[in-house]
Image (tube, rainbow, N blue to C red):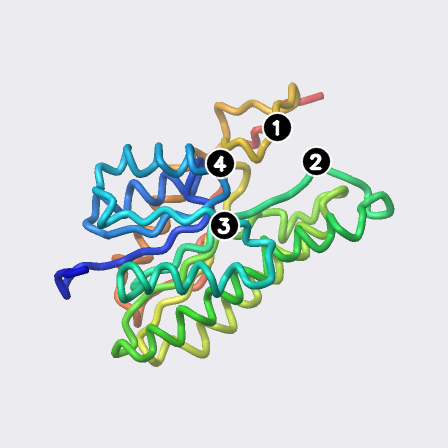
Amino acid sequence: MTRQKTERVALVTGAGRGIGRATALALARDGYALCLAARSFDELEETRSLSGLEPARSLIVLIDLAGEDSPQELFDATLGHFGQIDVLVNNAGWAPPRTPLLKTSAATQDRILAVNLRAPIALARLAAARMAKNAGAGAIVSVASAAARSTPAGEAIYAAAKAGLVAFSRAAFAELRSSGVKVAVIIPGLVDTALIPSNKHLDRSLMLAPEDVAGAMMSVLRTPAHACPVEIALEPQRSPERAR
């Protein structure tokens, strides 16, 4: 495939809805070609349609990032189609309903850790190696969660995974900033997405919107490498939790 050398390519995981979709659309408006990755073809096809990008500039990859080989497969698919990667957005996440630690199965534990921590680390490592060869240009932005700090009961493993992603991002930032590769992690409070189930104790109108997180992502990409923040915390002006 013939491509302009000036074209920028972004890989977005969890791109079918919510934060991932909002970020993909923001990237498309900014001129990026996209690799859109998630588990639902219909959702990814809708994201591509909304982006206005033709298939040559918007690769769809159906993938479950809980798979041990999935990060490598996704990275290889991106490079195979576009020949480069300039931005990695580690957005895909998964969590079951709040469950006491002693009732959490080993399979659930492994899936939480794989999707929220192992896969983002693997993709970041692959992307960083490629970006370092490309004159140190590129950005790796991950989505963590305020749960990493509030550590709510019933979310012990999810909170640990997101806290690990924050720690990983900070260490990778320290390692890669001198090469010009930007690393940042967005730490949002409650965002009005399908990941938050219906709950009469939550006022969804007070939650952050997916577009708020996408805006923070884009601010990282537009910031010079020497001034790039490693963490951006986003919180609603008022707590979405209603008084009980």
Residue on which the image places disc 1:
197
Mark 2 and mark 3: span between their CA atoms?
Answer: 22 Å
In the picture, the disc for residue 236 is: 4
Quick one: SS at disc 4? loop
Q: Nearer the viewer, mark 4 or mark 2?
A: 2
The answer to whether marks 1 and 3 mark residues whose Cβ atoms lie closer than 8 Å is: no
Residue on which the image places disc 3:
63
The answer to whether marks 2 and 1 mark residues whose Cβ atoms lie closer than 8 Å is: yes
Residue on which the image places disc 2:
97
The amino acid sitting under disc 3 is: Ile
Quick one: SS at disc 1? loop
Give the mark nearest the N terminus, 2 or 3: 3
Q: Nearer the viewer, mark 1 or mark 4?
A: 1
Give the mark nearest the N terminus, 1 or 3: 3
The amino acid sitting under disc 1 is: Pro
Q: Nearer the viewer, mark 1 or mark 3?
A: 3
Q: Nearer the viewer, mark 2 or mark 3?
A: 3
